[in-house]
Amino acid sequence: MSGRKRKNMTVLMGGWSAEREVSLVTGAAVSKALNEAGYSVTSIDVQRDMGALLTRLYPRPDAVFNALHGRYGEDGCVQGLMDILEIPYTHSGLLASALAMDKPVAKRLFAAAGIPVADEIIARWEDVAAGDVMPRPYVVKPINEGSSVGVHIVREGDNKPLFSNTGWPYGGRVMVEKFIPGKELTVTVMGGRALAVTEINSEHSFYDYQAKYEAGGSAHLIPAQIDQDVYEESMRLSVLAHEALGCRGVSRADLRFDGDTLYMLEVNTQPGMTPTSLVPEQAAHVGISFQDLVSWMVENAECDS
């Protein structure tokens, strides 16, 4: 640990998004690892009181590990605050975070970079609730939530209502996307380099929130059992998507492979660091310990000031 300039770290965690509980687990794991790596760590459960947050950020830390997930923590809001304060922070900057969180905008950038994406329609939630706006099967997604929050697959023969009587809690617009059958793949990009490809298998209908974070919710096959050319193309497309959004630090790309074409679903700019998370698993696969992973992230923290 000798020679490190950065010693005092603040971990932002919790927040008030739909992913609060996962963020608390991520933050606790990161705080523990940074402490064990020799850093002085302050953990903050972020609330809506910005005055309280600003007070707790002084004395100014050498860097912030942003362990927040979902809206306000992952979409550029906290990133902008750190930029104003000129405090280096982990993961992507304001613009890349905002672009990645807006699924339709991110998909347009992927397509412009030559990355295949599934066809989609942006519709009012009332119209989606009233009937099919594209041929089944299709996927209904919030415009700007993470961790598969609010995602539903509508298949032939399904007749249960998509939304509760209270409506759609994720805004007035909905993304309806063509369902891509096949293998679920994910790739970690660290410092512009793809680490590995994991194939995700789950007894759930897809890799939903429960499959991601509940013990036994999914099985991770690493390396993915796919042809070498598909494996390498998955990594190439993931780096290309990382670059198309302007990401930095660590990101994770989610893809589907239908046996013929790889489709980019989304890029997570702040992937989870829980005991069941994919990024630490892929890092370990290439010889990077969890402690070294989070240490690298804080040592490479930046701000856009």
Image (spheres, rainbow, N blue to C red):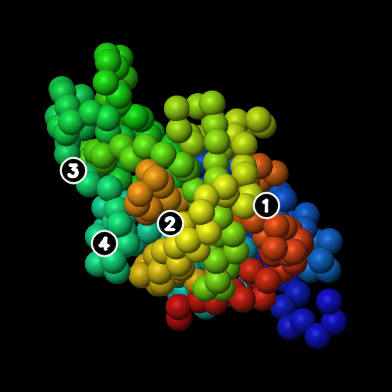
Dot 1 amino acid type: Glu
Q: How far is the residue under mark 1 from the one under mark 3?
A: 34 Å
The residue singled out by tag 4 in the image is 111
Q: Answer whether labels 2 and 1 touch (C-beta < 8 Å).
A: no
> Mark 4 or mark 2, which is nearer the start of the sequence?
4
Pick the front one: 231 or 121: 231
Q: How far is the residue under mark 4 from the one under mark 1?
A: 29 Å
Q: How far is the residue under mark 2 from the one under mark 3?
A: 19 Å
Dot 4 amino acid type: Ala
Q: Quadrant of the N terminus?
A: bottom right
Q: Residues within 10 Å of mark 2 (few under 14, many from 20)?
A: many
Q: Nearer the viewer, mark 2 or mark 1?
A: 1
Q: Nearer the viewer, mark 2 or mark 4?
A: 4
Figure disc tally: 4
Q: Secondary structure at mark 3?
A: strand
Pick the front one: 38 or 191: 191
> Mark 3 or mark 4, which is nearer the start of the sequence?
4
Q: Position of residue 113 (x, y in %)?
A: 29, 69
- In the drawing, what numbered circle is on residue 267? 2
